[in-house]
Amino acid sequence: MSAPREQFGSKIGFILAAAGSAVGIGNIVGFPVAAAKNGGAAFLLIYACFIAFICLPVMLAEMGLGRRSQHSPRKAYAELGQGLKRWEFAGWLATFTPFMIAVFYMVITVWIFGYLVQSLLGNLDLLASEGYFATFVNEQSFLLYLAGVTAITYLILVGGVRNGIERASKILMPALFIMLILLVIFVLTLEGSWSGVQFYLIPDFSRINGAVINGALSQAFFSLSLGMGILITYGSYFRRSDDIVTSAKLVAVTDTSVAFIAGLMTLPAIFAIFPDTNVDSLSDSSISMVFSFFPNIFLALSDTIGYLAASIAATIFFLLAFVAAITSLVSIIEVPTSSFMEKRDVPRKKALLTIGTLITILTLIAATSFGLVPWFTSFVHYAGVDKSVFDVITDVFYDTILPLNGLLICLFVRFRWKRAQLTAELSEGNPGYGNSWFGKYVNVAIGTFIPVILAAVFINTVFNKFFAISII
């Protein structure tokens, strides 16, 4: 007989856990750079509109589906889809996607952990040296860092929803906010930092075009962990009396606030240390920014505040990035773990051991695809270039499948579960939701233009990633 479904112990516990899944290194570095390169405050305004009017309805659909079914994605689609094969496929896809994304995120998290350890040891000059990152990714020390990240992730997840995920989120998320605020305060005291603030906050609508709008929507969608099955799984841990609508709004506000505040750290730091920086020359890759650009920022800062103080600042930054990464990794791995527990009716420890072993094996394969194993490095060829195993995982699952999963849940609500059922589910814990303007908006949007937009994003991503053609 299956054990009773686990539940979050408090509203704040869910909000911090869901926010932890949403807040990643993309919020800390990628979002500020994307905003700076695409119109500053103009980009922020478009991003905020997408969060409120497109992403939030999809978030509510995922959470409502999870609580209604009290299951993880695979079984939620199967049960509410009443056995139709096409909806069972959607459930499997929403489960397999986070499993593969966990591989990508595990590699990134291990790298961040390694940089954190090196900064703690005072090796800032080593981290900033030319070509170090290319050497670092193929070092045997990766195995030690992988063991450390695996142990931390296991200790959190083995405690379950209330004693593991929720308890860790209540510690790690406030710590993340505190470290972020401290870094912002520190950066804003640097000479020249306010030039970065002005560049970040003064809108430049001349930079807005179709590609920027598409990028803002993709950034918003990915930022809230939509399409990963996380919010379906977390929604299944809600009690019937919990207010899903208000909780979802608070998660969206929290995630957006972190991204916005991170901009007040990243852009002023760049302008203060490298005042002649052309933001258009900055990398679009969060990986490149975190592991190659930021160590050089802190090393250059040592000329002003001293090597020790710069090393401390670098350590806080990498600790901030690690907390953001580990909270996301925990929520991602929880999806296939929960699904395996349901499918096989096994205890959490056994499910974690199985899922964790598979992810670790694939992580090692992905980690060796940066030149260490040539066959994994030149794994396939598309869009005119050779792609590694890591590239394929990123392109297929992180960039392409997420909007497809979002599209599928919209179609599921529209044609199978029905919008009236979603409204009724969201009204539990929030009796006035169904008659509110927002409730009516979600009811219309989820079945009309949001699926069209997500379909366009998915099609454009497929053409862009695999054929090097942009249609938007």
Image (spheres, helix red, strand yellow):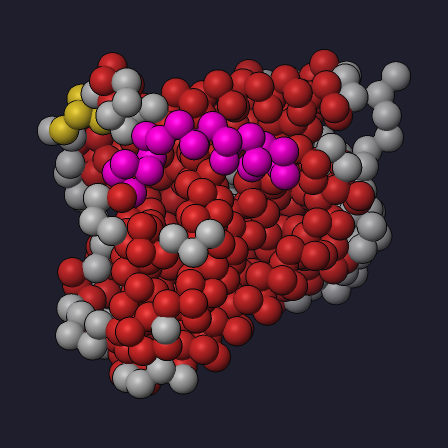
Q: 20 or 15: which is nearer to us? A: 20
Q: 121 or 270: which is nearer to us? A: 121
Q: Is residue 58 among the parts visible in the rendering?
A: no
Q: Position of residue 218 (x, y in %)?
A: 36, 50
Quarter of image, res 76? top right
Quarter of image, res 243? bottom right
Q: Is residue 306 among the parts visible in the rendering?
A: yes
Look at the image and tell me in which quarter the N terminus lies: top right
Residue sitting at 32 percent across and 30 percent down? 138
Q: Is residue 472 left or right of residue 3?
A: left
Q: Position of residue 153 (x, y in %)?
A: 62, 37
Query: What is the chief secondary structure element of the magenta stretch?
Result: helix
Q: Position of residue 424 (x, y in %)?
A: 73, 49
Q: Residue furthest left?
A: 384
Residue sitting at 77 percent across and 37 percent down? 159
Picture mark count: 0
Q: 177 or 56: which is nearer to us? A: 177
Does the magenta segment cover residue 42?
Answer: no
Q: Is residue 344 left or right of residue 54?
A: right
Q: Please, is residue 299 above or below residue 81 in the view?
A: below
Q: Please, is residue 56 above or below residue 257 in the view?
A: above
Magenta part of the chain: 133-153
Q: Position of residue 57 (x, y in %)?
A: 55, 53
Does the magenta segment cover residue 140?
Answer: yes
Residue sitting at 37 percent across and 67 percent down? 307
Residue sitting at 32 percent across and 71 percent down? 301
